[in-house]
Amino acid sequence: MTIVLIASLFYLLAGWLVVRRVLREDRAGVGFWLLTALAAVLLHATYHILTWRHVGGLDLQFFAALSLVGLGMAALTTLYAATGRMGALGAVVFPLAALSLAGYLWSGSSPRGDLDWRVELHAWLALLAYATLAIAALLAIMLWLQERALRRREFHRWLRALPPLTELETLLFRTIAVGFILLTATLLTGVLFVHDFFAQHLMHKTVLSVLSWLAFGALLFGRWRYGWRGGIAVRWTLAAMALLVLAFFGSKFVLELVLQRTG
């Protein structure tokens, strides 16, 4: 409980510091909010590790998975900021990570002690893929907002917190490429290691995941072959991410929270 409270406060503090930095156009104090975000990420991860050790198994149920994706997004945002890119993401990501962690604490843990290392590998790859592609979706939204503001000649303060349009677009496609590789590995390990991967209650999840994979793949091919960018990139990214959210969290919500089934 204490770890969750401190981690959430650090997340919210880091998010507030990012917002203040954007609004005041203040480039000072970057190191402080980065350290605050890093502390929140480490405490977030520590809470999961301690919980798994306490209950004797890995927890991958709905709220646990949501919290782990939030953790992955926060870690990626901190990494991006440390390399000098897209620290402004923290204004959205850090509060979301705090909410996901609080949701996990509220829901309690449901360990899955029957998972072997191959299924765990599949699960970790899936969580990394979802976190990476969720960051890509946020980058796509920021790209759309930046393009719209520039077309309308609306030079808001928050625009100064973003990298130039071409750099933001390059970062978007690099993030999608990494996420696509992770999603490919997720699907391959699912086929190889998960015995009920094509079971009836997982079929919709599998189909939606494959459709999302095809959409991300088509976007990367279109970028390479036809130079897709701007609005096309944004629409494809958000559509593919919507399919992925429905595949994983949509199916887990229905199975675990509505139908009260696990697995």
Image (tube, rainbow, N blue to C red):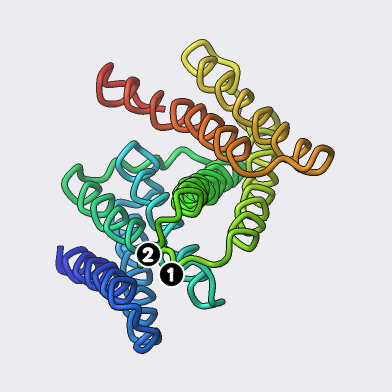
Instruction: Specify the amino acid type for callout 1.
Output: Ala
Give the structural element (helix, strand or loop) at label 1: helix
Q: Are marks 1 and 2 in contact (CB under 8 Å)?
A: yes
Q: Which residue of the protein is positioned furthest toward the top in this rendering?
A: 200
Residue beneath disc 2: 158
> Residue at the spot x=19%, y=71% of the render?
6
Classify residue 164 as left or right of residue 98. Answer: right
Q: Count residues near mark 2 (Cα–Cα under 10 Å), then give few for <14, some for 14-19, many for 20+.
A: some
Q: Secondary structure at mark 2?
A: helix
Q: For this rendering, which residue is in front, 147 or 56? A: 147
Amino acid carrying label 2: it is Trp
Which residue bears the numbered disc 1? 161
Q: In the image, is 139 to the left or to the right of 167?
A: left
Q: Is residue 20 left or right of residue 167?
A: left
Name the spot of residue 201 as percent of width and height, x first.
46, 14
Residue 222 horizontal/vertical position (percent)? 76, 36
**The C terminus lies in quadrant:** top left
For the N terminus, the image quarter is: bottom left
* Callout count: 2
The residue sitting at the front extreme is 153
- C-alpha distance separating marks 1 and 2: 5 Å
